[in-house]
Amino acid sequence: MTTPMRPFDASLPMALLRAREATMKLFRPLLLRHDITEQQWRVLRALTSNEGPVDAGELAAATFLLAPSLSRILVNLDGRGLITRTVDPDDQRRSLIRLSTQGSDLVRAIAPESEARYERLEAAFGTARLRELLDELHDLAALDLPAAETDS
Amino acid sequence: MTTPMRPFDASLPMALLRAREATMKLFRPLLLRHDITEQQWRVLRALTSNEGPVDAGELAAATFLLAPSLSRILVNLDGRGLITRTVDPDDQRRSLIRLSTQGSDLVRAIAPESEARYERLEAAFGTARLRELLDELHDLAALDLPAAETDS
DNA sequence: TATTGTTATACTCTATAACTATA
DNA sequence: TATAGTTATAGAGTATAACAATA
């Protein structure tokens, strides 16, 4: 007897992708207008959340970017004057990244439009319902299932 | 008064990405071992769901791939003998795609391992809870919010 | 004329490995 | 020796436009 795959529609990764695409459809035009890629925006957002500076490792983990990808994004954002990078005096291998004034200004410029779109989504889906969904997604991400024994 | 951004953790797109990454971490090694990319797998999975052939347009919509990306993936899968492409006799502009015997064999070979991993996830998160989450994600994706007036 | 799919082109990100500097 | 970050390299996908064939 063979093991059939569950229907494509019942696949959790697909459901997450579908939901993410539907959500991003609302925000993409906004980022495009400001000439920011999704990944660059994730970096700027992560930096906005933190008061102080963040090192590259933390930033990579928070944004789900690989170190080489992040490295290039930081070169780009630095070149555009949106972030500053300084060497950590306590550990000179570490690079401390923070939003520049110009970077903060950009986030502040995007914020109202972004929030307005978010509120439309919230109104359409339901505030309480959205909060519960966020909780469930958070718990799902926290599962941290071990890789199979057969994986290297 | 400025509009502050909501915390990075409370961002729905980030929560969806985080959850998707956590989920895919379980399946990626499996695809890697079979030398299939995530996007190629989406195509194979979409073809598995459908009994009959599917045209490229439907496939692109189902897999969230742009036409040029799909086009290259189809060349690759065709070259590996995993799919067949025929011209639709009723509309010769359309290309009808279906899984080849070899493609079906590959999906059948991956299915048991994939399902085993899915069941571990289901057991850890809860079957009923997962079903509810899938329902909510489905509803979220179905919202289809209109782009803002300011978007072109 | 509009649509379906492919090809062209430039860019970004992914992924692994090698490298530099520091610890 | 190990770690943090960058650079090298190859490959895949994104995105827009242009194109050929068909409707």
Image (spheres, coloured by chain):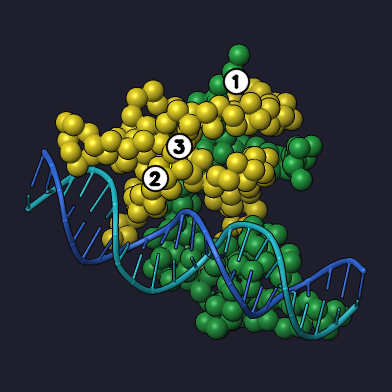
Chain colours: A green, B yellow, C cyan, D blue
Image quadrant assignment for residue A81: bottom right
Q: Residue at x 27, y 39 (%)?
A: B95
- As displayed, is residue A75 above or below residue B122? below
User: Which residue occupies 60% across, 41% down?
Assistant: B34
Q: Along the horizontal axis of the image, is B122 left or right of A76?
A: right
Dot 2 corresponds to which residue?
A: B74
Which amino acid lies under the numbered mark 1 shown in the image of this protein?
Thr
How far across and down, in percent of the image, does residue A92 sit? Answer: 82, 82
Q: Earlier in the sequence, mark 3 or mark 2?
A: 2
Query: Which of A118 and B141 lies nearest the eye of the viewer?
Result: B141
Q: Residue at left 57%, top 34%?
A: A12
Mark 1 neighbour class, 10 Å CA radius: few under 14, some 14 to 19, many 20 or more = some
Residue positioned 87% across, 80% down in the render: A90
Q: What's the CA distance linking mark 3 and mark 2?
A: 9 Å
Indicate the chain on which mark 3 is placed: B
Mark identifier at residue A3 = 1
Mark 2–mark 1 distance (CA, rounded to whole Å): 26 Å
Contact, mark 2 vs mark 1 (Cβ under 8 Å):
no
- Spot occupied by residue A62 in the image (x, y as percentages of width and height): 68, 59
The amino acid on which the numbered mark 3 sits, given as a three-letter code, is Leu
As drawn, B58 above or below B123: below
Residue A48 seen by the camera: no
**Mark 2 residue element:** helix
Residue D19 % position (x, y): 18, 62
Q: Residue tagged by mark 3?
A: B82
Q: Between A143 and B75, which is closer to the camera in this rendering?
A: B75
Callout 1 secondary element: loop
Nearest to viewer (mark 3 / mark 2):
3
**Mark 2, chain letter?**
B
**Of residues C1 and B125, the one drawn nearer to the viewer in this rendering:** C1
